Image: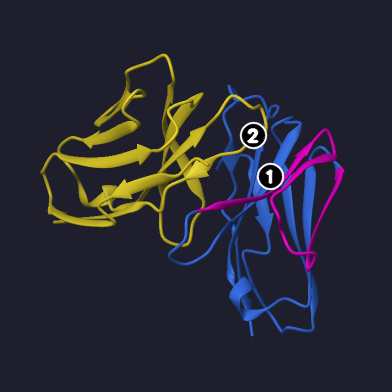
Amino acid sequence: KQEVTQIPAALSVPEGENLVLNCSFTDSAIYNLQWFRQDPGKGLTSLLLIQSSQREQTSGRLNASLDKSSGRSTLYIAASQPGDSATYLCAVRDSSNTGKLIFGQGTTLQVKP
Amino acid sequence: ETGVTQTPRHLVMGMTNKKSLKCEQHLGHNAMYWYKQSAKKPLELMFVYSLEERVENNSVPSRFSPECPNSSHLFLHLHTLQPEDSALYLCASSLTTASGNTIYFGEGSWLTVV
């Protein structure tokens, strides 16, 4: 059974710092991995999607990497800003075509001005 | 704005009430989903609908009853819920259930059972 773990559960940094959020999964037979952002009381916004054949994806100040064989992904946020404060969720999909996403519990990030 | 709209955004109901959550998508998608997000637990898939047919029921209690009258609308009917059912219920959709299709989430409906 696939399990997704995110470390740390919470993180507080001063503005301007570069930071790394970690995601690990127990079954390496994934189809893709997706990072989402969730603001308090809101739904999920997709940030980056990495296919299993890819090693990384970049969007602006965000860079997500994937090491499928070791069951790990990282989300790197450069030059963090207070507006980056949110919960970041990692989710994996397998190739079963059921549409099922398996989520981690998230990392809650606070960027202090 | 993801194109997936959920109503109501907030709902408080008693344990003997019957209420419904509604989800609507304007993306032309054929697959729709209900997810549950409880405090201190990961998001969990509840139901999957593909072309208006339920294709997955993730061991959800019968007090939650989904309905998909057409590919644009999805309901979650709630009946005799328990306080532990209080959570954020998220609707999502994708073009199909194929693993290569991006899933888009709504803003969620906050449910409190008293």
Marks 1 & 2, CB-CB < 8 Å contact:
yes
In depth, the one of A14 and A96 nearer the eye is: A96
Secondary structure under badge 2? Answer: loop
In magenta, the rendered stretch is: B43-69
When the figure is inspected, residue A33 is found, relative to residue B105, above or below; the finding is above
Picture quadrant of residue A110: bottom left
In the rendered picture, chain A carries what hue? yellow
Q: Given the current orientation, which residue lies at the most extreme top position?
A: A53
Q: Quadrant of the N terminus of chain B?
A: top right
Q: Amino acid at mark 1?
A: Tyr
Label 1 resides on the chain identified as B
Query: What is the x, y in percent for residue B13?
Result: 70, 80
Q: Which residue is mark 2?
A: A99
Residue at the spot x=23%, y=34% of the render? A76
Q: How many marks?
A: 2
- Please tell me if label 1 and label 2 are on a single chain: no
Query: What is the x, y in percent for residue A13?
Result: 14, 53
Query: What is the x, y in percent for residue A50?
Result: 41, 24
Query: What is the x, y in percent for residue A64?
Result: 30, 29
Q: Main secondary structure of the magenta part?
A: strand
Q: Which residue is mark 1?
A: B33
Label 2 resides on the chain identified as A
